[in-house]
């Protein structure tokens, strides 16, 4: 099938993404709002009148619209009674992840950050033990680097499978199975008597671990309110962003005093601790919670009429089809994906090349021990932490200073790119700084300090680059990020293989200069998107379609809310309302409050897409 035909088929398959994925992605903003409940209350009352049913919806006529409570939130599918829809029991439902206590939410964030840290550090801790692996199996340095390559390729493959699995069964079962399999696959790698015995378990262990890396942001999104979500993401990011640094940092000492096999045993122990942590993390995915609640209600009452709006899901085959194909189609047809995927992949690949270059340069040219060589990554670690600590300031003084988008009331996606423009200059600065200070007689502190701007820029690019695509593509962001993750993982897996030849032929100074110039050549990308990003987004068929659907939903919502108010006035005596039937006026402020009180996708999405 041709690429245009495949794209058309994918768009057809995902026509319900506006109603499904967007609803699920944005439920954390909407599930405490009342507009969806308002719309469904009207529909439920009308349905009951037409079918002579007794309503299970409680409605206080004198209560404000944002206090109306109902089990119903969206229109039913054909043959389903809206009075039997299972939804949150009001805005204070204790099973709603947004209503969990601050202490428990903090514990969840810390545990997810730790588990992601464990899986990521396993990829780079391996590089500390490469000399021992070479000696044990009699292989070259390039062949030994295949252990790093296979792990990153496994992460790329696993990230495509993790998303549909969590959509089908929920996040918690996927996390538990993922970390358990990851820990199990470490065992044969630690006991391997042939080099192939390391490569195969590392690949499949990475496929399993990918669920923690790719799905953990979804968990953070589930429990964090919109106001504090960016801050919570930065706290969670301490683990995954510093995992690549912590790996060689502790790996050097472990290899020096215990050998390369203990690099596996230590991660296996840490993974076991993480598995115990995950046992205390409850399910956070709203569709899974509501589907389970509806199933239990049917079992308890022996009444099959109870249902949830998430009961109708795509089959496993359909989910895999969309998740495996759409990211690649977007990666070659969407301008935003094309340029940002290439840019992030180049930077990510050079970052992983550093995990080969640092041990080589500090051990060979400065005669540092494996343990001290691991400490050379402290500059990169501090630079990453500095960016994470600066997130509230960057958001306040850079992102929030931009003029709000009139369609969303929030800063436009290009506000995220403003930070990347500065980061794009820091990345080559740090690389060139390191290239010309990494060897004696220059003092060792200077190449370590070069890691500060290098890591600050890298971390800013990964965090705010992902946020830019997330904000630009909305319901299609998962596919955009999946394609980005695959490409950067493949690039990070392959470029380090060229490290021995690159540094051997050019030497440390010119090899680093070549990498720095390559990063410098990519600097115009964020500046172009900052200046012309709005125009580029409008050239995207997917984004135009998403905005058209949003506009349609706004119009339908206003129409239904006005119908709701008209029904309210008709139910009251004319003497009390002081208005004739059909002459209903709503104050502009009240109308805006009602129409904007919930997310656009929640109320009428199913019937519109039908």
Image (cartoon, rainbow, N blue to C red):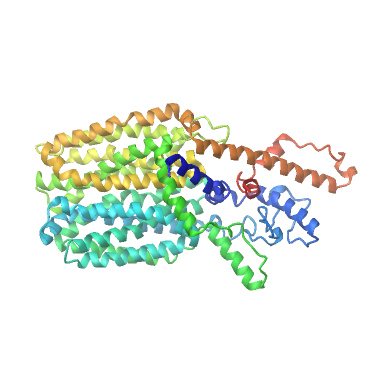
Quadrant position of residue 139: bottom left
Q: Residue at x 56, y 56 (%)?
A: 99
Horizontal side of residue 3 vs 456, given as left or right: right
Horizontal side of residue 316 vs 353, given as left or right: right
Residue at the limit of the structure toward the front, as seen here: 1
Q: Position of residue 507 (x, y in %)?
A: 12, 38
Residue 381 visible in the picture: no
- Tally of numbered discs: 0
Horizontal side of residue 390 vs 74, given as left or right: left
Q: Where is residue 564 in the image (x, y as percent from the top left)?
A: 76, 46
Q: Residue at x 55, y 38 (%)?
A: 545
| Residue in the foreground of this view, choosing between 415 and 11 | 11
Q: Position of residue 295 (x, y in %)?
A: 59, 67
Q: Which residue is drawn at 48% across and 40% down?
A: 473
| Residue in the foreground of this view, choosing between 84 and 424 | 84
Residue at the limit of the structure toward the top, as seen here: 531
Q: Position of residue 590 (x, y in %)?
A: 71, 39
Residue at the limit of the structure toward the right, as seen here: 575
Q: Which residue is drawn at 27% across and 62% down?
A: 201
Residue 469 visible in the picture: yes
Quadrant where the N terminus is found in the figure? top left
């Amino acid at each position: 099938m041709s690429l245009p035909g495949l794209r058309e088929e994918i768009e057809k398959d995902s026509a319900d993404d506006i109603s499904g994925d967007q609803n699920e992605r944005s439920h954390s903003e909407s599930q405490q709002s009342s507009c969806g409940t308002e719309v469904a209350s009207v529909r439920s009352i009308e349905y009951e009148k037409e079918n002579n049913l007794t309503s299970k919806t409680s409605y206080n006529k004198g209560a404000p619209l944002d206090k109306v409570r109902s089990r119903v939130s969206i229109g039913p599918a054909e043959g389903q009674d809206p009075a039997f829809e299972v939804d949150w029991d009001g805005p204070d439902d204790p099973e709603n992840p947004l209503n969990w206590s601050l202490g428990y939410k903090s514990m969840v964030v810390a545990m997810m950050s730790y588990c992601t840290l464990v899986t990521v550090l396993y990829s780079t801790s391996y590089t500390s033990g490469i000399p021992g692996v070479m000696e044990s199996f009699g292989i070259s340095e390039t062949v030994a680097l295949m252990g790093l390559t296979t792990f990153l390729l496994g992460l790329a493959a696993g990230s495509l499978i993790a998303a549909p699995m969590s959509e089908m069964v929920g996040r918690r079962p996927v996390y538990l199975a993922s970390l358990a399999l990851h820990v199990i696959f470490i065992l044969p790698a630690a006991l391997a008597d042939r080099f192939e015995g390391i490569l195969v378990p590392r690949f499949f262990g990475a496929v399993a671990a990918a669920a923690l890396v790719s799905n953990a942001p979804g968990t953070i999104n589930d429990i964090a309110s919109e106001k504090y979500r960016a801050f919570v993401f930065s706290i969670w990011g301490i683990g995954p962003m510093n995992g690549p640094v912590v790996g060689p940092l502790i790996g050097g000492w472990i290899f020096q005093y215990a050998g390369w096999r203990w690099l596996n045993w230590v991660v296996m122990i840490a993974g076991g601790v993480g598995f115990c942590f995950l046992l205390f993390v409850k399910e956070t995915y709203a569709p899974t919670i509501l589907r389970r609640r509806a199933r239990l209600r049917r079992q308890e009452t022996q009444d099959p009429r109870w249902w949830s709006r998430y009961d109708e899901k795509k089959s496993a085959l359909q989910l895999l089809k969309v998740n495996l194909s759409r990211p690649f189609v977007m990666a070659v047809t969407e301008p935003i994906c094309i340029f940002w995927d290439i840019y992030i992949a180049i930077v990510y690949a050079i970052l992983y090349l550093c995990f080969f270059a640092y041990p080589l340069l500090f051990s060979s040219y400065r005669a540092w021990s494996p343990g001290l060589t691991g400490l050379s990554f402290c500059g990169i670690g501090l630079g990453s932490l500095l960016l994470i600590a600066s997130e509230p300031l960057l958001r306040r003084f850079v992102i929030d200073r931009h003029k709000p988008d009139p369609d969303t009331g929030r800063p436009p996606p290009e506000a995220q790119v403003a930070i990347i423009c500065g980061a794009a200059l820091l990345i080559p600065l740090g690389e060139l700084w390191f290239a010309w200070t990494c060897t004696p007689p220059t003092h060792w502190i200077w190449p370590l300090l070069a890691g500060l701007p290098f890591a600050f820029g890298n971390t800013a690019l990964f965090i705010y680059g992902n946020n830019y695509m997330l904000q630009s593509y909305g319901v299609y962001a998962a596919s955009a990020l999946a394609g980005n993750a695959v490409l950067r993982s493949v690039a990070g897996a392959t470029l380090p293989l060229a490290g021995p030849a690159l540094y051997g032929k050019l030497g440390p100074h010119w090899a680093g200069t070549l990498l720095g110039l390559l990063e410098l050549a990519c600097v115009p990308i964020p500046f172009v998107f900052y200046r012309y990003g709005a125009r580029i987004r409008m050239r995207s068929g997917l984004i135009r379609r998403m905005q058209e659907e949003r506009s349609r939903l706004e119009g339908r919502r206003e129409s239904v809310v006005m119908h709701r108010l008209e029904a309210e006035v008709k139910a009251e005596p004319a003497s009390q309302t002081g208005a004739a039937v059909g002459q209903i006026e709503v104050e502009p402020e009240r109308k805006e409050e009602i129409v904007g009180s919930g997310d656009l996708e929640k109320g009428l999405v199913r019937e519109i897409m039908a």
